[in-house]
Amino acid sequence: MECVRDREWLGPNSIDGQSPAERPHRVSLTRNDDLVGRVHAGDHDHAFGPGEVPADHGLRREYGVPTGYQQGPFFQLQTEAFALIAVDTGVLKQVDEEQLTWLRAALDRADGKVVLALLGHPPLAGGLDQTRDNEPFAAITRLLREHHVHVVMAGDTHDLEYYRQPVTDDGKPGAVHYFVNGGGGAYQSFGTALAWPAQPPTAVWAFYPTRSDVASKIIHAAVSSLTELGRRIDVAVLDEVATRLASARRIDCYSVGAASTFMASELQSRLFRLGCTSNAIFDAHQQLVSASTLGPDGVAFVISHVGRMPYTLEAARFARSQGATVVALTQPDTQLAEIADLVLAVSVPQDAVMRVGTEAYLAHLVVIEILMVRLAQKLGPVATRGLQQFKQLLHKHGFDSAEYSGATESNDERP
């Protein structure tokens, strides 16, 4: 198999002036000690063409990493019966004249072989023809079709998709197979499943996850996350927190943001039903007032998955300075975790869309559930009797009780 080094696009720090820091980002393919090609790590990190502004300029500025110095962003690997032709479509989904000349020569050389064309962007993706309104991109697709390329693969969009486009070659029916290989990101994305058009560009198509797979995918992710939580949870810390809560004069729950506020409200409600004096406080000033009055027999229970909201951190620091026990329900190694006396650490995979995803919600709720059961055990029979009384009370007199419903119906019948 031959790897042909066809051309180099050099950034401002190229071979002769390359700094040591940049060399680890280059991987050489060698044969008989002669350089025959280079492969470079990175994504969306090279210029479209010589003299143009690098597409990764913002990434380099933001993260301070030495990317954007690729050499040979397109290449071909050819054997007697097979050809892999990798085409760099840059940022604008097109090629310049130099690469176009190279591509025509590579396709001519691959005549009669099984050809896999690897593009930077997919011609078909998201159930749409991505070459519409982009004539240079459409021209690349037509060129591949004219040279009887039957397999085209691309990434860029973080989805996994397949399209089968019928064609006729020399009077015989055939097909071009288009694959979108979105890599790891595809398994976190629902974009295709949520926005699939009514009329996709081909009659035969597939994508993952399908609509029917979405539910099972979410459930599987949740189960996997909770299983991992079970392996990592520190039961000793949970018991210590339960002990502090059982003896506390007052427990104030601090949070900020929709997800954490929901958890803090749930925690306060559960504590209240167990007979514990508790409050859920979301206002920044009120959190500081609470922190100043807790004292050594109080507990500040701070919930923040992200764990770095400044005013909540300030309230936690102040509560601790007053002698209160600070308990944190957060990810490990956050600023909040560093401040707290006791940390209920929750680690879940980062959600692809939301800052705090469903798996974090579930993990927090499970931790609260375990904690409340341990607290009820420490409080003893009085807590259990109280919960039973509340249940009976709500069953008999709650808004959804039979008695309340009957009373409402009687009132409605009055003249």
Image (tube, rainbow, N blue to C red):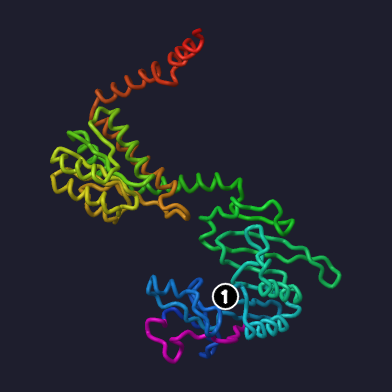
Name the one closer to the observer, 108 or 134: 134
Occupied quadrant, residue 13:
bottom left
Query: What quarter of the picture does the N terminus occupy?
Result: bottom right
Identify the secondary structure beneath mark 1: loop
Where does the image place residue 60, in percent across and percent down from the top left? 42, 74
Name the outermost residue toward the top.
415
Indicate yes or no whether the magenta region holds residue 19: yes
| Picture residue at 50% right of the left edge, 79% below the top | 53
Residue stretch rendered in magenta on the structure: 1-23
Frontmost residue, 241 versus 409: 409
* x then y, percent, for residue 182: 56, 63
Could you tell me residue 119's position as x and y percent? 62, 72
Q: Is residue 219 visible?
A: yes
320 vs 10, left or right, is left
Which SS does the magenta portion mostly show? loop
Q: Is residue 288 above or below residue 37?
A: above
Q: Residue furthest bottom?
A: 16
Q: Would you say residue 29 is visible in this rendering?
A: no
Q: Residue at x 62, y 75 (%)?
A: 94
The image shows residue 169 at horizontal and vertical percentages of 81, 71
In the rendered image of this protein, does residue 353 appear above or below residue 281?
below
* Residue occupying image coordinates x 22% and y 31%: 277
Q: Which residue is mark 1?
A: 90
Badge 1: few (under 14), some or many (20 or more) residues near its Cα, within 10 Å?
many
Along the line of sight, the residue nearer the viewer: 330 or 24: 330
